[in-house]
Image: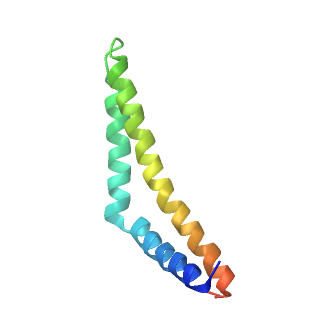
Amino acid sequence: MSDDKHRKDMDRGVRAEALMRDPLIQEAFETLEKEFVSAWKQTAITDAAARENLYQLLQALEAFKGHFVRIIEDGHFAKDKLGIKD
């Protein structure tokens, strides 16, 4: 992998990490998760479709967060490959 690719990955990792540390972003993730779980708990026993939809929303939220985590990890890997120390 080229140094340019490593630098790009490192920069993306720094940006993703800054976003994930942003209190507003953290609040959004926490609020959405709580709202989805609360709504799931309040579904009628006969409303399997609503529970499935809420489950899918929770999975999508986790996938979204996971994407940023992978970018952060790739950035750390790239930083190591470039020999940059903290």
| Number of numbered markers | 0
**Residue at figure coordinates x 48%, y 57% from the top left:** 67
Q: Residue furthest top?
A: 46
For residue 53, above or below residue 2: above
Nearer to the camera, 31 or 73: 73
* Residue ID at (61%, 85%): 3
Whole-percent x and y of residue 6? 59, 80
Q: Residue at x 48, y 77 (%)?
A: 14
Q: How is the image coloured?
A: rainbow
Which image quarter holds the C terminus?
bottom right
Above or below 72: residue 81: below
User: Residue 20 is drawn in which quadrant?
Assistant: bottom left
Where residue 49 appears, as percent x and y from the top left, is 34, 21
Q: Position of residue 31 (x, y in %)?
A: 32, 48
| In this picture, residue 37 sits left or right of residue 63 | left
5 relative position to 29: left or right:
right
Q: Can you tell which quarter of the image residue 57 is in?
A: top left
Residue at x 55% of width, y 61% of height: 70
Residue 56 vs 73, above or below: the answer is above
Residue 75 against residue 39 in the figure, above or below: below
Q: For the N terminus, which image quadrant?
A: bottom right
